[in-house]
Structure formats: structure tokens, C-alpha cells
């Protein structure tokens, strides 16, 4: 039965692409799961190096890309959901290419939606689980962070003893998920030279998970992540097993980092900007080391990793450059703002806000983003998306004069306007939510300037 189910599922993907209904990144998996309860386990079981998962609110796609690059640099054949379809159906779709002689993989790395983690690992027992961070995101779908952390804690407690669990020491919520887990590993940023002066007002989790008293921070890295401790009960951030000992941010183009590991020091020149990508690299390094990759190869792979679609992706358009920085929650948006401000030139910015299901219907989070420094330095501000008027109101309350911003809901018009307002050789920073990012990229795809997101990495 499962062979017929696999054949039908694969056919549904081909049909979806032929009819122009998308890249077939989820439909084949849904078909497979509906037709067979055993095919998924069998497909995953054929991968000798096992399946590892990467989950968290921010950074899943980029971190998975880094891990994939590190494994491929060692000559391993890697199965991954490169298009970012990270529910169980997306993982199933990625596995459907298994089982044919020329497509068998040595190892699989899947990014997994934070709320889908339990379903995925219960179906496919993983070799490794990397948990990145938890930030407030789509409250209308997921609820409060404590709920997700509690779910994750249950997931970790049920994992087989041989599964390696890696958690972010800088995130008190995520670190606590592995409470009582023997052999759990940690990663984090020891270098505090890029720390913030104080917790941002949108910081999400600032109370101790053990005694509910306020946490104290010796250094704030991003959001509620940093070097934390509780004066009341003594709970504190551990020294990470995989620690970023040096992080030199190189403007908006990347960074130079050193990561101390039990196997030696990883040195890399990232082409991905911002401290958040330094954290992504640390998490990726931790998983790669546990999967047996040597540190020198990891450094080269991290240095060679290019931006995933919409995540610090750069697209040349009419003598200008468009830089896409996906922003879907307050912490992610604040980190993107922080990154853009590293550019000391005039700033031309396109903000795109949608409220579709994949973005989250509740867009009130834009009032928790520290847009003010970005708006103050923007020579021109273009606003688009289904909730462009909400962005305009946010900008108005931040003091942006009406003659310095333009509201254009249509993505095509917004792109043309933003490029027209930018001098030749200049750069447009695009900060979109998820579906807005896909719409903007579709416009550029129709002009032959980039490829469809499901072809990313081909």
C-alpha cells in the first residue's frame, strides 16, 4: 500500500507544479499522510545518518541551511526541506524523494515549525534536536510563549535517550526546556561587545521559570536573550558548550566569528549580517559537531553559506540592490532594524505588512518594534501590503512627516516606487512579513530577476 501512496503523492507534486499552483512543497506530503500511516517512517528509516530537526521562532531556515552546507562540504548527501515548508506535510514532502537509487541520502536535516515539533518527532524519532529560541509570534495561532515552552519540555522528556538535544543557553525559556535531560548540550554568545544597553520594551520572557521572580541581565543580546540569572533562586545561564568567543559585525555585509567547541575552535567569515545570524551559526555548529563534522570544515561551510530567500537575500534590480530582511515579530523586526542601522549611508526603506494566515492576523506587534531610529534615518519610506495603512499610522506616531512616506498597497507599485526613489547604485532595504515577502519576490521573479522560492538552493 505504501508504494502506491508514495507514487500518488509524488504525482500530486508534479501536477501542482505543472498547473502553476506552487512548488508542491506541502501537497505531496499531505497526500502521503492521508494514504499511508507507515510510509513516512519507512522513508525516514532508510536514511543511515538519521533525521535531525531545527526548531525555534526565528532563524530556522538559515540555521538549517548552514547545517546542510556543513554536511555537504563533508561529502554527505543531505535531505532537507529547503523551501521552508516546516509542518509535518512539508517534512513528508521532502522525504518523498527518498527510496530511489539516485536520490538516497546519508542524513536528513529538517526545519520544523515550533508548534509542529511534537508531531514531527513523534512520527520520526530524531538523532538530534536543535532548539533555537522562543519569541512572541502569531499569538492568534500559538498563544503565549509559556505554552510552547511547556509543549517543548514534554517533547524533550519523551525523546529517546540516544537523541542529542541542543538548546540555546542565552534564552532562559529554551534552556529550561532541557531541564533534567542527561547529556543536553548548549550554545550561546559569550562575546558581549555587541550587547544592548538594556532590555527592549518588547522583551518577551523576563521572569524565572523556576520561581517566577524577575530575571537579572548582565548583558542583553537580543530580545530577552542574554547573560541572565535569578537573584531569588540562584538559577542562571550556564557557560555554553559551544560558545561564540568573538563576534565582529561587519556592517550590513556579514561578520567574523570564532566559536569555541569541545572539538576545537570554528572560525568563519559569515556573509549574513547581524548578531542573530551569529547565534544561528553557533547553533548550526553545535549540531554539526555532534553529527561528526570537523571544525575546519564547519568554518569553511559557514563562510560559504548564502542567504536563504528573504533572509538577508540581495537582488540586483535596475542598477540598485534590494536587500530582503524578513520580519514577522517584534524581536525579529528589531534585529533587522539594528542591522540596517549599521549602514551609514542614506536609508531607503520598503516596509511590507500583511495579515494573512501565515503572517498572523494580529498585527498589533508593530507597535512594539523600535522603528524610531530607522524612521529617523530614512530618506524615503515606502509602505505596502494589506495593512499598509497601519504601518503609515505607526510611522506617523513616530514623527515621520507625510511627505517622506508613500503608501502603496500593491507590491508591484511599491517596488517600482521604492526603486525610483533610490539613486543608481543605492540600496533598498525591504522589511516584509512572510506572505508580503513572497508577493514582492513574485514580482521580481516575473521580471526574471530571481527564481521561485521553492527552487532556492538548487
Image (spheres, helix red, strand yellow):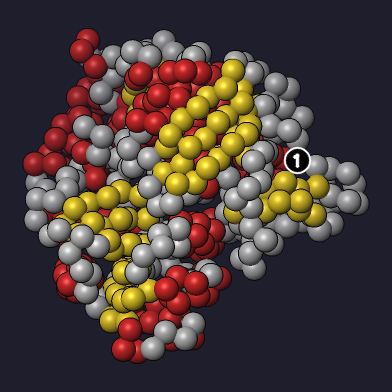
Q: Is residue 90 left or right of residue 177?
A: left
In this rendering, the answer to whether 10 lies above or below 98 is below
Q: Position of residue 43 (x, y in %)?
A: 35, 19
Whether residue 176 is visible? yes
In the image, is 329 to the left or to the right of 359? right
Image location (x, y in percent) of residue 341: 45, 62
x and y, in percent, of residue 385 in the image: 30, 71
Between 341 and 204, which is closer to the camera in this rendering? Answer: 341
Location of the N terminus (image quadrant): top left
In the figure, 145 relative to 304: above or below? below
Q: Which residue is under mark 1?
A: 237
Farthest front residue?
344
Q: Residue at x 33, y 42 (%)?
A: 307
> Residue at left 39%, top 88%?
401
Work out whether residue 147 can be spotted: no
Residue most toward the bottom?
402
Query: x%, y% of residue 245?
Result: 62, 34
Query: What residue is shown at x 28% (from left), y 81% (from top)?
Result: 406
Q: Residues within 10 Å of mark 1 (few under 14, many from 20)?
A: many
Residue 205 image-quadrant placement: bottom right
162 relative to 420 in the view: left or right = right
Q: How many labels, in total?
A: 1
Please name whichever residue, 335 or 363, is drawn nearer the observer in this view of the structure. 335
- Front residue of 318/98: it is 318
| Residue plotted at (9% across, 46% down) | 19
Q: Quadrant of the C terminus?
A: top left
Quarter location, residue 354: bottom left
Asked if 342 appears above or below 27 in the picture, the reply is: below
Which one is nearer the viewer's eye here, 265 or 363? 265
Depicted 159 relative to depicted 87: above or below? above
Q: Which type of secondary structure does the marked residue at label 1 adopt?
A: loop
Amino acid at each position: 500500500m505504501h508504494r502506491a501512496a508514495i507514487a500518488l503523492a509524488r504525482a500530486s507534486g508534479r501536477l501542482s507544479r505543472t498547473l502553476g499552483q506552487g512548488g508542491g512543497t506541502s501537497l505531496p506530503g499531505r497526500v502521503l499522510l492521508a494514504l499511508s500511516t507507515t510510509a513516512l517512517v519507512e522513508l525516514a528509516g532508510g536514511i543511515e545518518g538519521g533525521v535531525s530537526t531545527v526548531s525555534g521562532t526565528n532563524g530556522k531556515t538559515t540555521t538549517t541551511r548552514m547545517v546542510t552546507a556543513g554536511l555537504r562540504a563533508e561529502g554527505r548527501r543531505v535531505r532537507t526541506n529547503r523551501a521552508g515548508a516546516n509542518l509535518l506535510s512539508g517534512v513528508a514532502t521532502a522525504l518523498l524523494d527518498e527510496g530511489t537509487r539516485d536520490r538516497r541520502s546519508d542524513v536528513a536535516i529538517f526545519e520544523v515549525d515550533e508548534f509542529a515539533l511534537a508531531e514531527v518527532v513523534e512520527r520520526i524519532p530524531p538523532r538530534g534536536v536543535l532548539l533555537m529560541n522562543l519569541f512572541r509570534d502569531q499569538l492568534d495561532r500559538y498563544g503565549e510563549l509559556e505554552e510552547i515552552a511547556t509543549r517543548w519540555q514534554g517533547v524533550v522528556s519523551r525523546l529517546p535517550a540516544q537523541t542529542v538535544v541542543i538548546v540555546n543557553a542565552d534564552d532562559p525559556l529554551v534552556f529550561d526546556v532541557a531541564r533534567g535531560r542527561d547529556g543536553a548540550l548548549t550554545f550561546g554568545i559569550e562575546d558581549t561587545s555587541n550587547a544592548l544597553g538594556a532590555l527592549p520594551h518588547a522583551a518577551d520572557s523576563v521572569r524565572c521559570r523556576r520561581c517566577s521572580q524577575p530575571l537579572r541581565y548582565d548583558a542583553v543580546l537580543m530580545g530577552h536573550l542574554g547573560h541572565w540569572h535569578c537573584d531569588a533562586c540562584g538559577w542562571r545561564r550556564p557557560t555554553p558548550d559551544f560558545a561564540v568567543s568573538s563576534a565582529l559585525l561587519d556592517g550590513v555585509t556579514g561578520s567574523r566569528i570564532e566559536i569555541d567547541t569541545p572539538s576545537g575552535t570554528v572560525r568563519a567569515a559569515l556573509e549574513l549580517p547581524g548578531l542573530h545570524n551569529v547565534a544561528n551559526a553557533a547553533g548550526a555548529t553545535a549540531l554539526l559537531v555532534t553529527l561528526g563534522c570537523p571544525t575546519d570544515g564547519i568554518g569553511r561551510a559557514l563562510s560559504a553559506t548564502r542567504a536563504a530567500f528573504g533572509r538577508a537575500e540581495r537582488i540586483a534590480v535596475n542598477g540598485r540592490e534590494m536587500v530582503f530582511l524578513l520580519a514577522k515579530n517584534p524581536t525579529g523586526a528589531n534585529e533587522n532594524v539594528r542591522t540596517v542601522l549599521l549602514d551609514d549611508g542614506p536609508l531607503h526603506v520598503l516596509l511590507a505588512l500583511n495579515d494573512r494566515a501565515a503572517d498572523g492576523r494580529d498585527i498589533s506587534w508593530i507597535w512594539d518594534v523600535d522603528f524610531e531610529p530607522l524612521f529617523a534615518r530614512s530618506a524615503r519610506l515606502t509602505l505596502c501590503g494589506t495593512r499598509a495603512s497601519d504601518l503609515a499610522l505607526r510611522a506617523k506616531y513616530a514623527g515621520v512627516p507625510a511627505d517622506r512616506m508613500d503608501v502603496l498597497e500593491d507590491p508591484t507599485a511599491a517596488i517600482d516606487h521604492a526603486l525610483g526613489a533610490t539613486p543608481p547604485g543605492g540600496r533598498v532595504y525591504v522589511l516584509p512579513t512572510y506572505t508580503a515577502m513572497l508577493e514582492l519576490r513574485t514580482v521580481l521573479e516575473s521580471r526574471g530577476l530571481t527564481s521561485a522560492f521553492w527552487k532556492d538552493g538548487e
